[in-house]
């Protein structure tokens, strides 16, 4: 039986990152994948979604092209967009597998199953590990009344696994992150979107009221048919479409349905009980602050262990787990320090606490604010929606959290994330040198409002 310092089960962002990092730090590593290398994020999540988001943005921005002296009309084709993301995904997957090979990581194809706390069975063989990381991700949740049907009722996994179905009228179900992102994306890719949502977009998120206002206004300008505060009671797959019936007697007939109804941790066929690994009541693998499961040398990371199901979290978890394998209990997970992003009609990013959480922690939040509406870069891009908002503690001047709304929020957030947790974050934002004109300059402007309007001059500019 082959012996390894570390066996990683699952090759999504969590598992892949853990395997690479552990190898770079000198461990002898095996990784097991039962489906596509790269997991949900690469094959059916972040990577193809961002490819489509870019296409959707090009279409959305083209409405302002005439003002820039660019003439002609643009139209989008979801099938062409699907082909594009497919090529990008294949390209990234090749580079992932090639890098693992070059690093000498032992890659096993098949389903990994615990035999005991150190042994994993894969199809016809057993391997043994001193440490094991469970990184088996999540699967889409399909409500009972939605009959999954090829070409008619789809999860996002189905949408990226096969070319899109025929027909332009699409019902999107759910107002969480997937619903909010795909309502925008599909509406720009030539679909007629009927959005079936129980609440307003991202109503259950930590984003502030000003952030949600900008998002809701931007979505309201699109040709989306909203069915807010409604849930389909009955869903019938017909020969030529899908009929959704509602409690008030009304109905909608569409060509196909896309579900954004949540995801569930994936532990199916893992046989976790053979190793003594405990799950919680919702099916997540139970972990402590060091990401150890109930068996100390077995760790769990990413979607399978954390209800904050993002690639960013899985990547962060991988660093924490590997640090603790190398030096036991040396690094705690800090969920608040991991940025979260949403890619819709506007980009939204956040990190740390919002004002409510700050108050719940008996802190007094001060808000530094700078909008993109007068930012020269944003004006030149015809895209002035959004702002940078910094939440600081009135007493200490510590940076408690931040929000970036608008174009490139997913890049700008890094300048803030880099300083999150540093005592002198505000002084750093005020004194660092910026590229001009750039959207990131609004971090400096927001910091200066903390000095001017909230009396944090000493913390921002020094004595
Ligand atoms: C449509 C969509 C868009 C998204 N966009 C973003 C985004 O923009 N930003 C972001 O941060 N997050 C995004 N996410 C979330 C992100 O994809 C997940 O949080 C992330 O992939 C979780 O990583 P993971 O490593 O925990 O698991 P996964 O990526 O789910 O990978 C787990 C892997 O383990 C394998 N596996 C499972 N069981 C076994 C077993 N027993 N043996 C062997 N292999 C096994 C699976 O086949 C899978 O490949 C998106 C998700 C979706 C669905
Ligand atoms: N940008 C990102 O980081 C990103 C992008 C996409 C997905 N994800 C992650 O993937 C996971 C899944 O996303 P999601 O949007 O599907 O989940 P979600 O939990 O954010 O939203 C689920 C939605 O489905 C609705 N819903 C639940 N049960 C239903 C039912 N029976 N009938 C109708 N509607 C129902 C809920 O009301 C809610 O609106 C999330 O954890 C999310 O964080 C992250």
Image (tube, grey):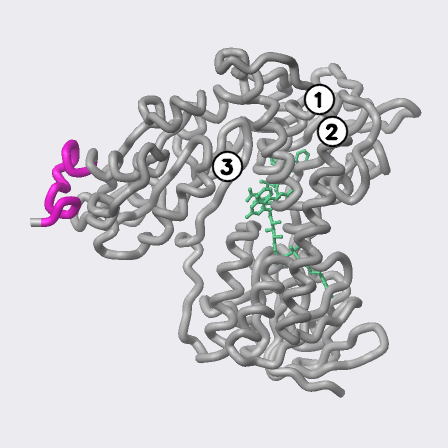
- Depth check: 52 or 128 in front? 52
Residue 158 in sight in this render: yes
Location of mark 1 (residue):
190
Q: Can you identify the residue that label 2 sits on?
A: 78
Q: Earlier in the sequence, mark 1 or mark 2?
A: 2
Real-space Cα separation, disc 1 to disc 2, in angstroms: 7 Å
Magenta segment range?
450-462
Q: Is residue 281 visible?
A: no
The image quadrant that residue 349 belongs to is top left
In terms of sequence position, does the residue under pointer 3 or pointer 1 come before the other?
1
x then y, percent, for residue 235: 80, 28
Residue at 51% of width from left, 62% of height from top?
317
- Residue at point 33%, 45% (across, down): 401
Q: How many numbered marks have been drawn onto this rendered protein structure?
A: 3
Q: Does residue 70 appear to the left or right of 239 in the view shown? A: left
Residue pictured at 57% horizontal, 37% vertical: 177
Relative to 63, is 205 on the left or the right? left
The quarter of the picture where residue 344 lies is top right
Farthest residue in the right direction? Answer: 239
């Amino acid at each position: 039986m082959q012996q390894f310092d570390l066996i990683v089960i699952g090759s999504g962002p969590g598992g892949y990152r853990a395997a690479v990092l552990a190898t770079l730090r000198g461990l002898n590593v095996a990784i097991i994948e039962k489906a596509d290398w790269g997991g949900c994020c690469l094959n059916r999540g972040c990577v193809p979604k961002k490819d489509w988001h870019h296409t959707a943005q090009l279409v959305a921005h083209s409405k302002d092209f005439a003002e820039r002296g660019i003439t002609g009309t643009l139209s989008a084709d979801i099938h062409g967009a699907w082909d594009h993301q497919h090529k990008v995904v294949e390209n990234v997957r090749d580079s992932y597998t090639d890098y693992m090979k070059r690093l000498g990581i032992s890659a096993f194809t098949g389903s990994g199953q615990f035999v005991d706390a150190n042994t994993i069975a894969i199809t016809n063989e057993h391997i043994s590990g001193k440490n094991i990381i469970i990184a088996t991700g999540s699967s889409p949740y399909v409500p009972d009344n939605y009959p999954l049907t090829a070409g008619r009722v789809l999860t996002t996994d189905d949408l990226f696994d096969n070319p899109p179905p025929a027909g332009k009228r699409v019902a999107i179900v759910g107002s969480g992150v997937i619903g909010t992102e795909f309502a925008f994306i599909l509406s720009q890719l030539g679909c007629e979107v009927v959005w079936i949502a129980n609440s307003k977009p991202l109503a259950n998120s930590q984003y502030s009221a000003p952030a949600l206002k900008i998002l809701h206004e931007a979505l309201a300008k699109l040709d989306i048919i909203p069915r807010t505060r409604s849930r389909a009671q009955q869903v019938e797959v017909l020969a030529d479409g899908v009929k959704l019936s509602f409690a008030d007697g009304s109905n909608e007939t569409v060509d196909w349905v896309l579900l954004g109804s949540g995801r569930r941790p994936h532990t199916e066929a893992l046989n976790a009980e053979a190793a003594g690994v405990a799950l919680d009541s919702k099916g997540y693998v139970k972990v402590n602050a060091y990401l150890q499961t109930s068996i100390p040398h077995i760790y769990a990371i990413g979607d399978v262990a954390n209800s904050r199901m993002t690639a960013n979290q899985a990547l962060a978890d991988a660093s924490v787990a590997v640090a603790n394998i190398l030096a036991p209990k040396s690094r705690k997970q800090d969920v608040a320090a991991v940025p979260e992003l949403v890619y819709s009609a506007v980009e939204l990013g956040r990190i740390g606490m919002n004002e409510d959480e700050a108050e719940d922690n008996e802190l007094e939040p001060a808000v530094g604010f700078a909008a993109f509406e007068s930012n020269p870069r944003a004006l030149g891009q015809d895209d002035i929606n959004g702002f940078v908002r910094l939440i600081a503690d009135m007493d200490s001047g510590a940076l408690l959290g931040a929000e970036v709304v608008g174009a490139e929020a997913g890049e700008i957030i890094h300048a803030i994330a880099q300083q999150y947790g540093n005592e002198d974050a505000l002084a750093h934002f005020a004194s660092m040198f910026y590229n001009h004109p750039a959207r990131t300059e609004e971090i400096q402007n927001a910091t200066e409002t903390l000095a001017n309007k909230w009396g944090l001059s000493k913390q921002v500019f020094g004595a």
